[in-house]
Amino acid sequence: MSRLDRLVILLETGSTQFIRNTAANQLADLAKQHPDDALNLLARVYPFLLSKKWETRVSASKAFGGIISNYPKWDPNSDDGDNDNNDTTTTTTTTTTTTADPSADSIIPSIIKQELSEENIPISTIKEEVKSDEEALRQLIDNDSHNFIGFDDWSLAEILQCGKILLASSGQEYNSSNKETSTDTANNNTDQNEEFNIKRRKTEFILKYGLNEVKNELKSEDASNIPAKKEEDSNNKIPSPSSSSTSPPPSNNNNNNSNNGGNSPLPNCSDNTESKVASARMRAMAKRKAKFSRSNSSKQPQVDLSQSSVSRQLANETSNIKQESDNSNSNNNDSTTDIDITSQNNGSKLVIEHKVHEVSPLLKKNEKFANWVWPFQGVFELLLQNLFDDVWEVRHGSAMGLREIIKHHANGAGRVKGKNRSENDLRNKRTLEDLCVRLITLFAMDRFGDYVSDTVIAPVRENSAQTLSALLLHLPEDVVLKAFNALTKLVKQDIGELGIKVPCWEAKHGGMLGLRYFVTVRKDLLFSHPELLDTIINIVLFSLNESDDDDVQSVAASTLIPIASEFVNLKLDLALQMVNVLWIIK
């Protein structure tokens, strides 16, 4: 186990929070020293971000943020001039077409050009393949831009009425897995199926609670003690009447020999001692095996975060195009591509060595397309997918991971090569708006809460609100106003506006959390748009008066804390009304 592996495992096995945070800081220092390996470090930390343990997820999010903060900013238009924003449609087309040739030349280094010249392969064919890949990539990027969700497509009534309710889990872990669905086998072999289900559930119970190692130790002890038990049974066996009648009586010599040890049971004693030694040795081996399996189970599988949906689609399309030509030559070269034959001892001997692929074919296939998109596009898509998972720990870890990404690299989200700055700005806006819509949707769908104190603890909604606060700093003003209106709808749940009556205090709680962080991070909009401040005050008074839930009232009372002094100076009459309402609630 390398030092890096031990450092990553400390995120989960650290005895104190200080040790886990120290490991996270050291991983961030590694990313600072080696920024090119940031994605590999994120791939090691990512599984711990979805752990079942709260402390592990918090430490993993700290390491996640430290690694991401040390990665350089992504700007594919950094080399472009300032004239991109003033270009017309004709100039943008010429810009995109002229950028294909320099990129093709940059992909083909001088060493590869020399090898191609030695093999009499024209460079023009390679350039044509690169250009075709670029055109296919641009087409995929254009098609991918239609998958974004905006506030114009968002409907709170449909979400509250038909949306999936996200609780602590789906409940599948309490059901017996792999139930028999065949009616024929159920009707014909009911007894066999019932016996099979009992055995399967017993095996699942043993594996779930870690009793398989104890079972293996018991089996090894029983196997080592079977010969000794058989010998004892054969010695203590009662003779049959026929054998006792035909056998002659023992003589004195035999008795003396038996007393002197001629036929004494000493060999049986030695067998017992050997079996005890063997069983002790088997127990030691079982303990070492269990320790090794525990150490291996702590190693989380590494996830490839360099792949995104665009790179995978492009790699699949290009592989399908070239599959016919590759298959024609694969049958003849399969026996020789994986071996290396060298001569030894002046040609008298041949050594055949197996060549191991340094890079996985799947990773190698996506490698040349990964540099075209945002470096964090792969992990961003994974976290978006896990944001609506059935298990609340996965949703919690995904929200924290998205918070760290948006905090440091929100300006690079959605940007790709081959587009000018205005087009990339539009893609960035649509990507961030899509995330904002998903976060507000999560406020309406999440129902998980933990009652460990006087107020509810909603980790998924709380961290999603923190992610939204980091996102609001990078959104344009029109999208921020749309998000504000969506949050107010989530809190009010007006029957006349929605058309349905679906009272849900968890959705109100999530909306108030979003408004509280909105007031904290966007004070400039509150005072530049006085109607927003009036709406916030009315929402707080509505939540304090109309809501019957203490948790919603608690969040509403703390919403105006960041602007308490400005609120008193600008709205003194409403401040006195707010104090009276708070005294009545108390």
Image (tube, helix red, strand yellow):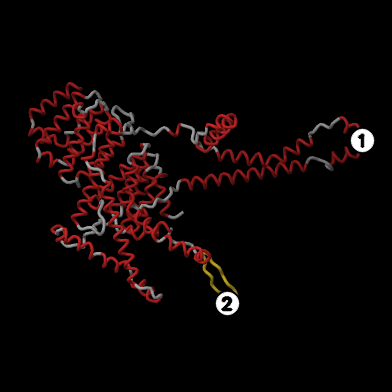
Residue at 66%, 44% in the rendered image: 277
Quarter of the C terminus within the rendering: top left
Residue at 33%, 33% in the rendered image: 164
Left or right: 575, with 471 as reference point? left
The secondary element bearing badge 1 is classed as loop
Residue at 28%, 28% in the rendered image: 455
Of 342 and 327, which appears nearest the observer?
A: 327
Of 191 and 432, which appears nearest the observer?
A: 191
Of 251 and 193, which appears nearest the observer?
A: 193
Q: Which residue is mark 1?
A: 248
Position in image of residue 300 (x %, y %): 43, 47
Residue at 11%, 29% in the rendered image: 575
Q: Quadrant of residue 88?
A: bottom left
Tell me the number on the disc at residue 531: none
Q: Amino acid at mark 1?
A: Pro
Position in image of residue 193 (x %, y %): 57, 32
Crowding at mark 2 (Cα within 10 Å: few <14, some 14-19, many 20+): few
Q: Quadrant of residue 312?
A: bottom left
495 lies above or below 215? above
Which of discs 1 and 2 lies nearer the camera? The answer is 2
The secondary element bearing badge 2 is classed as loop
Going by the picture, which residue comes out furthest to the top?
584
Left or right: 4, with 232 as reference point? left
Position in image of residue 47 (x %, y %): 39, 46
Position in image of residue 475 (x %, y %): 19, 46
Q: Which residue is mark 2?
A: 347
